[in-house]
Image (cartoon, grey):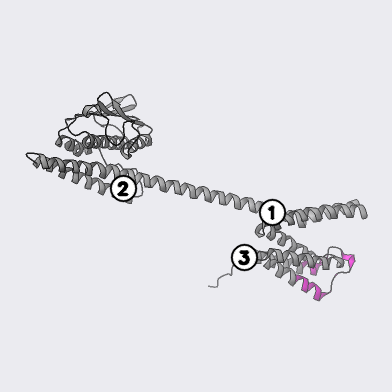
Amino acid sequence: MMSIPRFSSTTVSALGTLVVGLLLWVSGAFTLIQGWGGHSAPVKIAILVAAFVVQLAAPRRPSAALAIMVVLIALDLPSGASLPLWISFTDVIFAVMTVGSARLRRFVGVACFAVTVAGAVAVALAADPRAGVLVGLLGVAFLVSPLGYAQSVHATIRAARAEQSAAAAEHAAALAEERRRVSRELHDTVAGHVSAIAILAEAAREAPDPKPVIASMRSNSLAALSELREMIDVLAADGDDTPTVRWSSLAPFVTAAEAVGSAVEVHGDTEGLPLAIETVLTRIAGEALANATRHEPGQPVAVQLVSVGEIVEMTVSNGLTDGRAMARGEGDGSGGNGLRNMMIRAESIGGSATAGVEGRRWVVRVRVPVVRA
């Protein structure tokens, strides 16, 4: 099956001018002013060919095309102003205003307005006001109109570029957020369990019977591996809203804290809460338990979860040795990746999280609204 050749818009426009010129020739309207002599057939053919070639070259060589077209029009004007040349001139002006340099565009814009106004005024004063109006209208049609079309094209291009820039910025922001999300997931999934394993390994060296401690190490290892696998599945899937942990996932953190001598109490549960809220609360509680195990081993830890109307409040507190805040300069509740992740996770579902010293205890407080499906 034959394929239809595709032509550029410039080629189509040049071919259109050529066809229109031939029609004007056949109809006897090749020149605008019939009484100025006109052209012979060879000259008309030469004009049509010249207009066709200059139009084709205008997008690639706008300055040269403009100069050649001005010369052709100046040479042709005494013979009555050939309409195909002026039609081609319109296309050349459009090409200059769309692909030409800023300086060339300014010059052509000013020149087109100046020639239109000056021509209309000169003819009105020298001949007839009605003829001056006609010349002004012709100037608008052949010189000023292409400026308006080109301005519309530039506005469209600017809008498209702005849209592309906005899309690129949105993509970069989404990519950065995805990286932060993966970083939080890795931190919450790996750091807590690995930290607990390191503490338990140290405790096993000094424990009279290391078997319970080793069992807790194994439990944390398996929990970390399981959560890593679940996280990989979520990252590989189309969506990212599937919860990877449940409230029961706190068991390895509780076991690790108890293995280093901390008494852990957990009051309340997440039954009836949306899965997204359960995931966030579990992550924050797990991070708080891991911090307590790492920084204050042997101190009692309490996890309290209560619902007050449509608000869920969770408190994780642990004792402080000699009343000190935990290490890592976290006394103000703003330092460390763990605390930042807690706050970010709570804010992601419209809640808040704070952490700091209260008396002789380190307290993490979380408040999140309950939005039920």
Q: Which residue is mark 2?
A: 234
Whether residue 175 appears in this view of the structure is: yes
Q: Height in image: 55 above or below 364?
A: below
Query: Which of the two labelled residues, at mark 1 and mark 3, occupies the earlier sequence position?
Result: 3
The part of the image, by quadrant, that contains residue 14 is bottom right
Query: Looking at the rendering, which quadrant does residue 203 occupy?
Result: top left
Range shown magenta:
23-48
Quarter occupied by the C terminus: top left
Q: In the rendered view, would you say 270 is above or below 75? A: above
Q: Earlier in the sequence, mark 3 or mark 2?
A: 3
Name the amino acid, label 1: Tyr
Give the SS element for disc 1: helix
Q: Which residue is mark 3?
A: 8
Neighbour tally class for label 3: few under 14, some 14-19, many 20 plus, Cα within 10 Å: few
Q: CA distance from mark 1 to mark 3?
A: 18 Å
Query: Could you tell me which residue is drawn at 74 percent across and 54 percent down?
Result: 109
Q: Is residue 25 above or below residue 102?
A: below
Residue indicated by mark 1:
149
Q: Quadrant of residue 33?
A: bottom right
Q: Is residue 140 above or below residue 201?
A: below
Estimate the x, y position of residue 252 in percent, counting from the top left: 19, 39
| Real-space Cα separation, disc 3 to disc 2, in angstroms | 47 Å
**Amino acid under label 2?**
Val
Mark 1 and mark 2 residues within 8 Å of each other at the beta carbon: no
